[in-house]
Amino acid sequence: MPFDGTLDVRTQILLDARSLLARRNGWCQHTLHMNKYGGDSYCILGALRISSSQHNVNLALNPIGQAVLRSLLLALGEPNGISPEPIVNFNDARSRRKHEVLSLMDRAIEHLP
């Protein structure tokens, strides 16, 4: 369980990405990253790229990175998904709100094996 007192790299990547998104003006749509109101904003994948690179993990090529993406896909109800497209579509949905993005990150942490 990710919250048993020890955090593995997958959990830390998701928590760090969630922290970036949770900041004031930390979340954006339709781009990986932008400088907004004097601070950095990220979409879900942009935040994951920053967080995973800080842990020397390539999201697409490293099994740890792939597990992080799979946990997000599971949280989105895409158990057979391998493409990040559903994550992008979720992030960029016109009616999407930041609290929904943060909730998805929480559910992804819960879906880690």
Image (cartoon, helix red, strand yellow):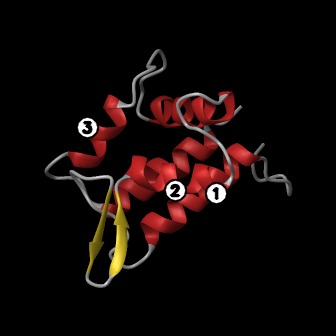
Left or right of residue 71, residue 64 in this image: right
Q: Where is the N terminus found, in terms of image quarters?
A: top right
Residue that carries the numbered disc 1 in the rendered image: 54
How far, Cα to Cα, is label 1 from label 3? 25 Å
Residue that carries the numbered disc 3 in the rendered image: 89
**Mark 2 or 3: the one toward you:** 2
Which of marks 3 and 1 precedes in the sequence?
1
Which of marks 3 and 2 precedes in the sequence?
2
Residue positioned most to the left: 94
Residue 35 horizontal/vertical position (percent): 29, 73
Q: Disc 1 marks which amino acid?
A: Gln
Res 54 → quadrant: bottom right
Q: Secondary structure at mark 3?
A: helix
Left or right of residue 110, residue 93 in this image: left
Front residue of 25 and 52: 52
Q: Secondary structure at mark 1?
A: helix
Q: Which mark is residue 50?
A: 2
Residues at circles 1 and 2 in contact by the CB criterion of under 8 Å: yes
How far, Cα to Cα, is label 2 from label 3? 20 Å
Q: Disc 3 marks which amino acid?
A: Asn
